[in-house]
Image (tube, grey):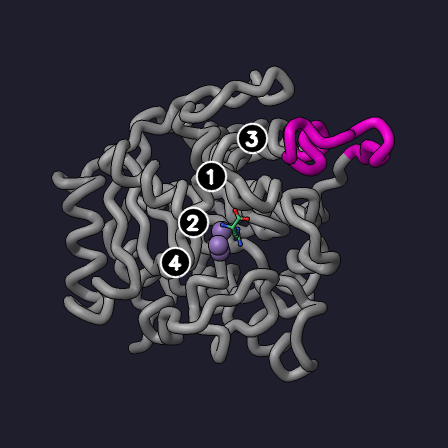
Amino acid sequence: KTAAIVGCPFMGGQGKPGVDKGPIHLVEAGLTDQLTELGWKVKFDGHHQFESIDAASDPPIGILKNPRLVSRVCESVSKVVGGHAKAGELPVTLGGDHSLAMGTISGTLSAHPDACVIWIDAHADINTPETTDSGNIHGMPVSFLLGIGSKIPEFAWVKPLLKAERLVYIGLRDVDAGEKRILRENKIKAFSMHEVDKYGIGKVVEMALDHVNPKRALPIHLSFDVDALDPTVTPSTGTPVRGGLTFREGHYICEAIYETGLLVALDIMEVNPSLADPEGVKATVAVGCSLARAALGETLL
Ligand code: ARG
Ligand code: MN
Ligand code: MN
Ligand code: MN
C-alpha cells in the first residue's frame, strides 16, 4: 500500500495569506515519517509547483476572485491526484484552501467513477456564481463538481461527475441562505452539528455511510476541512466557526472511514499557520497530521 502526498501550497480560493504554507508545515511536522510508521510506502517528491497568473491577467468573473488561477491550479491537481489514484496509490492532498477539492475530487472520480464523497466542514462550500456573497471560490467547489449554477467557460474542464446522492456532509454550522436552498433542492444529505449533538458521532457516521454507501462497496473520497473542528482545537484556519466537532469526534470520523477499507483519497484542507499564536498554530498543524494518520489506520490501541 502506497500513499502519495500531494502538497498544494495554494491560497487563490480565498483572501487570507498563509494558507499556502499549510502543506509545508504539515510535512515539516513529520507527516511522511508518521505515515511510513503506520506501514505505508509514502511517496513525496516536494510540494506541487503552480504556475502563477498575475492579478492583472486574472480579473474577477462576476464577483469570483482569481478565477483563471483557481481553475488552472485545480485542473493540474486533478491530473496529479487522478494519476496517483489510477496507479493504485492513495493520494493525500494537503491544502491550501478548499477550492483545491475541485481538483482532488475530479481526479478521484476520473479513476473511480463510482466513488462517494464525505465532506467534513463547518461550511457546505456549495455556493454557485449566483449565490456567493464573498466571491471566494473555496466556498464553491462542490457546486462545480455537481454541475449546478451557471457555467463559466474558464472552468469548462470541470466535469459534473459527482452525483448529489453520492455526497454527504458532517459538521455543518455556517451555511449561507443560498446554500441551504441548494442542499434542499438537490436533496443533499447533511449532518450538521445539530445532528452530531442529537445522535452522537458514531451514529452520524453510520447514517452518513448508509446514505452514500449503503452496501459499503463504493470507494470513498474524504475531504476534511480542519475548520470542521471547534476553533479551540484548530484555531489556525481562515474561517473558524464556534460550536464545532471535538478533537475526538473529528478523529472518530477518520478512524471509522479507515475501518471501512474503502478510502481511496484524502484531503486535509485550510490549515493556515499564520492565524493563531505559536501554540495554536502548532496544535492546528498537529491535528492536521493526526487526522491524516487516523484516516490511514492509526488506532488508539
Ligand atoms: N460560505 C462562505 C463563502 O462562500 C464561507 C466559505 C468557507 N469555505 C472554506 N472552505 N473555509 O465565502
Ligand atoms: Mn470550512
Ligand atoms: Mn457564511
Ligand atoms: Mn471547506
CB of residue at label 1: within 8 Å of ligand 1?
yes
- State if disc 2 and disc 1 touch (CB < 8 Å): yes
Q: CA distance from mark 1 to mark 4?
A: 28 Å
Residue 292 or 128: which is nearer the viewer? Answer: 128
Residue 295, numbered label = 4
Foreground mark, 2 or 4, reads 2
Q: Residues within 10 Å of mark 4 (few under 14, many from 20)?
A: many
Residue identifier under label 1: 127
In the image: residue 124, left or right of residue 115: right
Q: Secondary structure at mark 2?
A: loop
- State if disc 1 and disc 3 touch (CB < 8 Å): no
Q: Secondary structure at mark 1?
A: loop
Q: Amino acid at mark 3?
A: Ser
Residue at screen point 71% across, 68% down: 274
Q: Which comes before the other along the chain, label 4 or label 3?
A: 3
Question: Where is 14 relative to 147, above or below?
Answer: below
